[in-house]
């Protein structure tokens, strides 16, 4: 995420230097739209959304251009392993996510257009590992702004055990 930190250019440089595959999320979309006719009027409040405006003003033009080219989702397909769909929120909506409080039926409804066995989505900033039918939904939590009451940086590793992906949740 490029927002809510004083180093958006350094974040982009690190992503590039490591060759990490990236996607856009709701913050990237909002930063790109600030000051344009596509921006939601609420974001014109510079004081309330100072972090977004600061990020927009300080991001190098080449990084803004790169963010514009990021996809909304990525499929990770490794031979012999269940495929993973990586997205920020819900399919076709980075402003909503999979909350732990949702029922399996509600999650299944949000997955109707998804054909991958594993979905990794992070928008809610709350760790999640849920089997819904033949699919798994994982949320790694949040390194910078967890919303589950634990202030530690949170992330998830996925380990393939020969049959399925196993989430390993970490807090530091």
Image: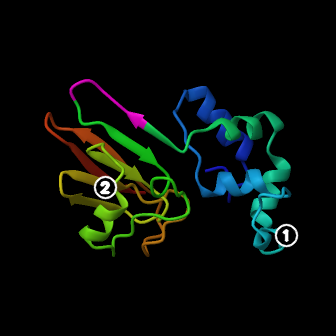
Magenta stretch: residue 77 in it?
yes
Identify whether 106 is placed above or below 79.
below
62 with respect to 127 (left or right): right
Real-space Cα distance between discs 2 and 1?
36 Å
Residue 81: x percent and y percent?
23, 32
Q: Few, some or many C-alpha atoms within 10 Å of disc 2 (few <14, some 14-19, many ≥20)?
A: many
- The secondary structure type at the circle numbered 2 is strand
160 with respect to 40 (left or right): left
Magenta stretch: residue 99 in it?
no
Of residues 3 and 5, the one drawn nearer to the viewer in this rendering? 3
- The secondary structure type at the circle numbered 1 is loop
Please tell me in which quadrant of the rendered image residue 38 appears: bottom right
Residue at image point 30% right, 27% down: 78
Residue 31: x percent and y percent?
74, 54
Residue at image point 42% right, 72% down: 148
Q: Which residue is mark 2?
A: 137
Residue 48: x percent and y percent?
78, 75
Residue 170: x percent and y percent?
35, 55
Of residues 170 and 161, the one drawn nearer to the viewer in this rendering? 161
Residue at image point 16% right, 37% down: 161
Identify whether 14 is placed above or below 100.
above
Please tell me in which quadrant of the rendered image residue 172 appears: bottom left
Question: Mark 2 vs mark 1: which is more N-terminal?
Answer: 1
What secondary structure prevails in the magenta region? Answer: loop
Q: Which mark is residue 46?
A: 1
- Segment tinted magenta in the rendering: 75-80
Q: Which mark is residue 112?
A: none
Identify whether 47 is placed above or below 29.
below
132 with respect to 113 (left or right): left
Residue at image point 44% right, 76% down: 149
162 with respect to 43 (left or right): left
């Amino acid at each position: 995420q490029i927002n809510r930190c004083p180093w958006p250019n350094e974040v982009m440089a690190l992503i590039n230097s490591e060759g990490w595959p990236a996607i856009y999320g709701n913050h990237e979309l909002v930063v790109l739209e600030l000051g344009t006719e596509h921006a939601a009027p609420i974001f014109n409040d510079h004081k309330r959304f100072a972090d977004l405006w600061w990020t927009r003003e300080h991001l190098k033009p080449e990084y803004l251009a790169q963010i514009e080219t990021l996809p909304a989702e990525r499929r990770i397909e490794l031979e012999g392993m269940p495929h993973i769909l990586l997205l920020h929120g819900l399919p076709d909506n980075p402003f909503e996510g999979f909350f732990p409080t949702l029922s399996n039926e509600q999650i299944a409804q949000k997955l109707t257009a998804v054909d991958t066995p594993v979905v990794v989505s992070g928008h809610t900033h709350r760790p999640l590992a849920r089997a819904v039918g033949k699919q798994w939904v994982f949320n790694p939590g949040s390194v910078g702004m967890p919303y589950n009451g634990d202030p530690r940086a949170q992330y998830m590793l996925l380990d393939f055990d020969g049959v399925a992906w196993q989430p390993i949740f970490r807090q530091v």
